Image (cartoon, rainbow, N blue to C red):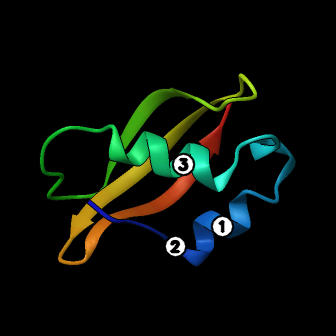
Amino acid sequence: MSVIITGHARKRLKDMRQDDITLDDIVTAAASIPGQIASATRFRGFFARSGRMFDLVVKDVNKGRLVITIIGK
């Protein structure tokens, strides 16, 4: 499954709250969610390689899994 990261999500990675979370961390986390996600849903408790905890809001679309935003903890 392909993972699509929105421009908004990429912009959020530059915020201090999402510091030390990489695109690779996001792709790995999004791909690890099982099943089909019909509407935008928040998934909690992912960890970046740096140890930083984050949440994802994702939705499945025709082209793959769309990452709408990232929320750092």
Specify the quadrant of the image occupied by residue 7: bottom right
Mark 3 residue type? Ile
Q: Residue at x 71, y 43 (%)?
A: 21
Specify the quadrant of the image occupied by residue 64: bottom left
Assign a secondary structure to mark 3: helix
Farthest-out residue, right: 16
Q: Which mark is residue 1?
A: none
Q: Position of residue 63 (x, y in %)?
A: 25, 77
Q: Which residue is mark 3?
A: 26
Label 3 close to label 2 by CB (< 8 Å): no
Disc 3 vs disc 1: which is toward the camera?
3
Label 3 close to label 1 by CB (< 8 Å): no
Q: Which mark is residue 6?
A: 2
Label 2 close to label 1 by CB (< 8 Å): yes
Q: Position of residue 53 (x, y in %)?
A: 63, 26
Where 57 sits versus 35, above or below? below
Separation of disc 3 and disc 2 at Cα?
12 Å
Q: Which of these two is toward me, 25 or 6?
A: 25
Mark 1 residue type? Arg
Q: Residue at x 20, y 38 (%)?
A: 34
The quarter of the image holding the N terminus is bottom left
Sort mark 3 into few (<14), some (14-19) or many (20+) by Cα contacts within 10 Å.
many
Mark 2 residue type? Thr
Sort mark 1 into few (<14), some (14-19) or many (20+) by Cα contacts within 10 Å.
some
Q: Position of residue 14 (x, y in %)?
A: 81, 60
Assign a secondary structure to mark 1: helix
Q: Residue at x 54, y 48 (%)?
A: 26
Q: Which residue is mark 1?
A: 10
Q: Earlier in the sequence, mark 3 or mark 2?
A: 2
